[in-house]
Image (cartoon, coloured by chain):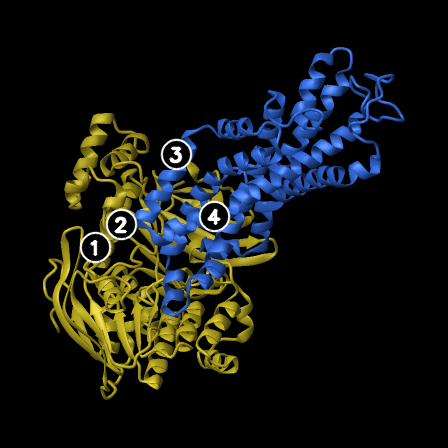
Amino acid sequence: MTSPFLLAVEHLGVHVGARPLLRDVSFRLRAGEALTLLGESGAGKSLLAQAVMGNLPAPLRAEGRIALAGTESRAADTRARRPHWGRTLALLPQEPALALDPLMRIAPQLSETHEFVRGAAFEAAQAAALCDLETTGLASSARRYPWQLSGGMAQRAAAMVARAGGARVLLADEPTKGLDRHWRDHAVAMLQDVQGSGGCVVVITHDLRVAQALGGQLIVLRAGEVVEQGDTHAVLANPQHAFTRRLVATDPAHWPRRQAAAPGAPVLSARGLSKGFGGKPLFEDLDLQICAGDRFVVQGPSGTGKSTLGNVLLGLLPADRGVVHRAEGLGSTACQKLYQDPVASFAPRVSLARSLKDVAVRHRCPWPQVLQQLQKLGLAPDMLQRRPSQVSGGELQRIALARILAAKPALVFADEPTSRLDPVSQQEAMSVLLDALDERGAALILVTHDEDIAQAVGTSRWRLTQDGGRPDVP
Amino acid sequence: MNANLMGIPALARHASRRVAVRRRAGFAILALVAVFALAGPFAIGIDPARQTLADTLMPPGAAHWLGTDLFGRSVLARLAHAARLSLGLACVAALSAAVPGVLLGVLANWRGGRVERALVMLADAVLSVPGLLLVLLFAALAPGRYWALYIGLSLSLWVEYFRVARVASRPVLAGDAVQASRLLGFGAAYILRRHLVPALAPVLGTLLAFSTAQAVLALAALGFIGVGLQSPTPELGLMMIEFLPHYEEAPWLIAAPVSLLMLLVLGMMLLVAEEDAP
């Protein structure tokens, strides 16, 4: 019995106890086809990948049927698909850098997969590994450990290991999360390569550009339910469901350009600023001035010192040379920071209400005023009884914003504040941030790798370059 | 995604039910021993040092539940006093090692540089001497005195607290949460109260149980080799060495202090039970 489909999923569902987490998902993929899963965080996208693999955590039950390269099995039968792992079915997990063995060099990790999963002889496996590394431009990193690789390199290495067993069905969980445009294109090319060589891919992503580049089918998930399914280009060009329309509208490429406010008095200026790490200069001889109402966007590839520049301007890191001058009359708490990972920026074992009250007391900000601010940011006060890890990333980023607003800042340094959020939360968080800053007349330093966000938000944009040279202003 | 999954109550319950049972068992055992140590001496009402040379090595009976020793002293009364002594001294020694140990560990991280190097050197110097030897040294200075044992125990125990507090507070102090608090204008006291204490409390609770158990064992070991507290003080190690010659004719005697010691240590180990590796 040969089926034309490489991967066919029928009525897949996931439950914990009586509570459904994912309901009735069906799709079929032929060789050379792609499927994109879109949706908010927590919509069940990663659960779907885990259910297909058959490695759901213990109390979760899967139902439905899964046919893989002609062999059909019940979704709940987790052992049935285990022999296929690496050979027919492979998963590229989120944060690929964490999926690699930190104590093993790259080349042996790869040749091990060739040897034990694909069954090549030792010498042949080593040769194949070197050949793989050669073609993906990682030959010079063959003897390095995973922690010595940049994010983009680790991503390519993990993808290579995932594919080394010869799996034709590749599930990729947010393969472009946190990557800049260059590496995003790289990841997409890798997925297209799987398609081109007779395989099929299932991609979980927030990024509409990835979906568009891959084409094929699209499933939009919301709270565990399929709200829209069909051809990617057709759905994205003409979304039927309100939720899909919202997803498309919140893509940064469709954001309206924000008006620049009239610049006010200077808040912060720097002269001859230089900073390097381990002998390698990140930036040299920078002169800049930030005025009230400015939205100063810092861009550049990863590892060029974008965050470092912000931290030096805020006085969190000492500069190697040069001075940062704050305007007269600004207190020590006038410059505040919003973090990339909001969960990490709160005391983890203290309730949010406690954290906010402490700040309100410290800055003599009446509590009702804080509550009013929260309401303005679209947050319910009862949420504050929870701990930081118990609210979603988008909500927590808004609470973090309320926290720094209580300190009445003149300047906010936002370090990739929305890069870990799904597009809907991203747009919400960004627009409340900008509104709040406009209202206060405060300045913003924004670090982002997203060209579209930079374009829509920035009043002035700086780009740091790889070789540590001077930034150019586009 | 994983954070979301752990929010599902069924998963959290699944992970911790067995641990909860163990902790409850440990707590129950310790509570029993503590009640015995605190209330036992009054409830039994027999002077542990009163000798009745007519009733030596009596088997367990109505008057003396655990029998009598070579001098006709009530073993139950002596055991209760010994339990009070061991538990009390060990708890005080562990606590007074914990406070300076933790504060120095945090200080080392906070100040860094020379302060940290000096403190680490001091801790390493203490570590280079086996813990029991250090207690032995102090015990030799003033044989049979409580304070000598207490100081010796505290001095050998603080290093663990120092090392653990230093390592555990490093990621907290270097983390975004503390940086955000500093930017918002909070000082050292706030960071200690809201960030460090909540982060360190669970690991210190575990350590406290371990080092109390360690102190109980050290006290018994010193008594056993005759350099700790001296007779006629009722002490677990002393009782063992006194009862050892009679193990054949009166095996219940040696069993009593050994069982109590085992229960004490078992209770503390169960109390800090951790999840098995999957």
* Residue B83 to residue A401: above or below: above
**Same chain, labels 4 and 2:** no
**Which residue is the site of mark 3?**
B125
The amino acid marked with disc number 3 is Ala
Tag on residue B102? 4
The picture places residue A8, in percent across and down from the top left corner, at 41, 50
Give x and y (percent) for residue A372.
49, 82
* Chain B: colour as depicted: blue
Q: Which residue is mark 1?
A: A186
Q: Which residue is mark 2?
A: A155
Viewer-nearest of discs 1 and 4: 4
Residue at horizontal 41 percent and vertical 54 percent from the top? B172
Q: Circle 1 sits in a helix, a strand or a loop, which is it?
A: helix
Subunit of label 3 = B
For badge 1, the amino acid type reads His
On residue A466, which mark appears? none
Q: Nearer the viewer, mark 4 or mark 2?
A: 4
Mark 1 or 2, nearer chain start: 2
Mark 4 to mark 3: distance in Å? Answer: 18 Å
